[in-house]
């Protein structure tokens, strides 16, 4: 009857929601992890870049050439 069909649909709906939120949650977690790695990499790069610029621009040899 209708009751059995409704229960079957309801259980399929629950399963679908469960699978969806599990996937989306895991995917979001991976994205956030990659974003953190990206930010850390950028920070390290900028620190090294600043140190190198300081070394080049702040070096006595460079100042003699100006």
Image (spheres, grey):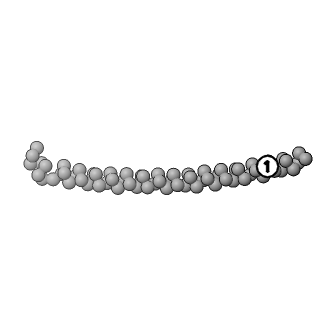
Q: Residue at x 10, y 44 (%)?
A: 66
Q: Residue at x 42, y 52 (%)?
A: 38
Residue under numbered circle 1? 10
Q: Quadrant of residue 40?
A: bottom left
Point out residue 30 in the picture as x, y percentages from the top left corner.
52, 55
Q: How many marks?
A: 1
Residue reaching furthest to the right:
1
Q: Residue at x 75, y 48 (%)?
A: 13
Image-based side of 36 in relation to 59, left or right = right
Point out residue 61 in the picture as x, y percentages from the top left corner.
11, 52
Residue reaching furthest to the top:
66
* In-front residue for pair 58/1: 1
* In-front residue for pair 63/17: 17
Point out residue 18 in the picture as x, y percentages from the top left corner.
69, 53
Image-based side of 25 in relation to 45, left or right = right
Image-based side of 28 in relation to 58, left or right = right
Mark 1: secondary structure: helix
How packed mark 1 is, by other alpha carbons closer than 10 Å (few <14, some 14-19, many 20 or more), is few
Image-based side of 22 in relation to 31, left or right = right
């Amino acid at each position: 009857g209708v009751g059995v069909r409704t229960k079957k649909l309801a259980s399929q709906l629950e399963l679908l929601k469960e699978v969806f939120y599990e996937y989306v949650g895991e995917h979001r977690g991976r994205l956030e992890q990659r974003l953190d790695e990206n930010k850390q990499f950028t920070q390290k790069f900028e620190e090294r870049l600043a140190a190198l610029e300081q070394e080049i621009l702040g070096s006595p040899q460079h100042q003699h050439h100006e």
